[in-house]
Image (tube, helix red, strand yellow):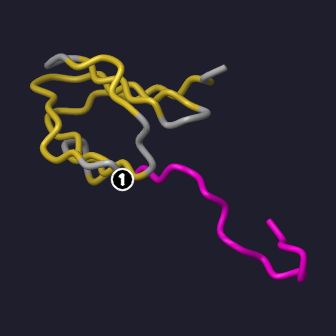
């Protein structure tokens, strides 16, 4: 995305970093919609991200993001609006 001076800048999008199948860092989190040991659904603004798995939990949470841990079997993105 270019600003008025023609300089390309970073677009403010959520960031999801998955390490293996047991650790995921989410930046840009708006809210937690569903929280259980087999399903965690988070609101990323324009999107929802749902984790499916076993023994899922949020290890860290802040206004900027969260860390989801446990056995992550699959992830699903869906439009929010």
Chain part drawn in magenta: 1-17
Which SS does the magenta portion mostly show?
A: loop
Magenta stretch: residue 14 in it?
yes
Element marked by disc 1: loop
Quadrant of residue 8 within the rendered picture: bottom right
Q: Position of residue 35 (x, y in %)?
A: 23, 19
Q: Quadrant of the C terminus?
A: top right
Which of the two residues, 42 or 38, is positioned nearer the viewer here? 42
Q: Position of residue 17 (x, y in %)?
A: 38, 54
Q: Is residue 2 above or below residue 77?
A: below
Q: Is residue 63 left or right of residue 37?
A: right
Magenta stretch: residue 16 in it?
yes
Q: Position of residue 26 (x, y in %)?
A: 36, 48
Q: Is residue 10 left or right of residue 57?
A: right
Q: Position of residue 47 (x, y in %)?
A: 56, 31
Residue under label 1, please give it. 64
Which of the two residues, 7 or 71, is positioned nearer the viewer here? 7
Residue at 58% across, 52% down:
13
């Amino acid at each position: 995305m270019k600003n008025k001076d023609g300089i390309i800048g970073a677009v403010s999008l959520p960031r999801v970093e998955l390490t293996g199948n047991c650790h995921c860092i989410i930046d840009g989190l708006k809210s937690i919609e569903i929280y259980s040991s087999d399903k965690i659904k988070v609101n990323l603004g324009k999107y929802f991200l749902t984790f499916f798995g076993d023994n899922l939990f949020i290890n860290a949470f802040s206004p900027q993001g969260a860390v989801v841990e446990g056995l992550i079997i699959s992830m699903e993105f869906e439009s929010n609006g």
